[in-house]
Amino acid sequence: MLELFTDPAAWASLITLALLEIVLGVDNVIFLSIITSRLPEHQQARARRIGLLLAMAGRIALLFALGWLIGLTAPFLNVFTLELSWRDIILIVGGLFLLYKATTEIHMMLEGENEGHGKPGSAAFAAVLVQIFMLDLVFSLDSVLTAIGMADEIVIMVAAVVIAIGVMLVAAEPLSAFVQKHPTVKMLALSFLLLIGVALIADGFEFHIPRGFLYFGVAFATAVEILNLIARKRRNTTKMAPTP
């Protein structure tokens, strides 16, 4: 165990895995900011923190259940010429849920329905936590399977997950505040969730869409939106400036 601290290969694996978990966690943080926005304001930050800690516990549990996790990739159902495994079913169901959730939120934004935060009380709070936990497990399947292929030591995999969740805990609050403050950014985030939902369903049917293409498209759209926000802020500043 101690030799891992002096092994350059172990450190390289840790850094690579941590970066991978952080990049793959972007969609998770966006989902967090969207789903917790329906809670009363004083519960939102707490829900995000608890949700991420539950996500960390779930990912670590998946890592320690390697045999069961690898068994999920074994085909058990034939649909015409397509062989489906439990992993495929989980990805398809998770993708459909994301499509439903993002479409519902977009409908509420466009129709102006339920603009206030969601039902107060422990029931709504618990429901949000359950959704965060279940969707994170779906998001985690591929990243955990990738981690298994990239590292030999369970300690390295667990450390990478803990580091990634730590980064997400720090990033969740400012990102959520930014998304909620700017409706156009929230619409962009919901569109991103729609893309991720489609990608999960495609993965479930053995049609892999490289996440790099999705992330590039979202990054480009985000850059354009940032330029729009800057331009809008300058216009407002010009309007407010006193005329000589």
Image (spheres, rainbow, N blue to C red):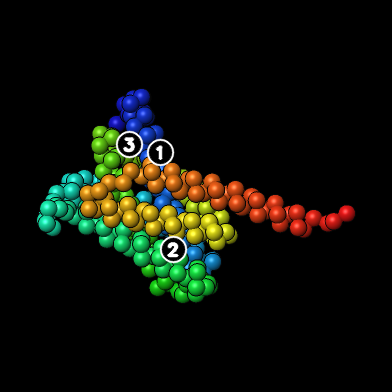
The disc, 2 or 3, on the residue closer to the chain's N-terminal end is 2
In the rendered image, which residue does mark 3 sit on?
156
Q: CA distance from mark 3 to mark 1?
A: 13 Å
Percent position of residue 217, x then y: 44, 46
Tell me: 97 left or right of 178: left
Task: Identify which residue is drawn at 25% across, 48% down.
Answer: 207
Percent position of residue 74, x then y: 14, 49
Quadrant (top left, top right, bottom left, bottom right) of the N terminus = top left
Percent position of residue 223, x then y: 54, 46
In the rendered image, which residue does mark 2 sit on?
35
Task: Identify which residue is drawn at 42% across, 71% down.
Answer: 124
- Label 2 secondary element: helix
In the rendered image, which residue does mark 1 sit on?
19
Task: Identify which residue is drawn at 83% across, 56% down.
Answer: 242
- Label 3 secondary element: helix
Residue 119 position (above or below residue 200): below
- Label 1 secondary element: helix
The disc, 3 or 1, on the residue closer to the chain's N-terminal end is 1
Residue 140 position (above or below residue 122): above
Dot 1 amino acid type? Leu
Tell me: 45 left or right of 134: right
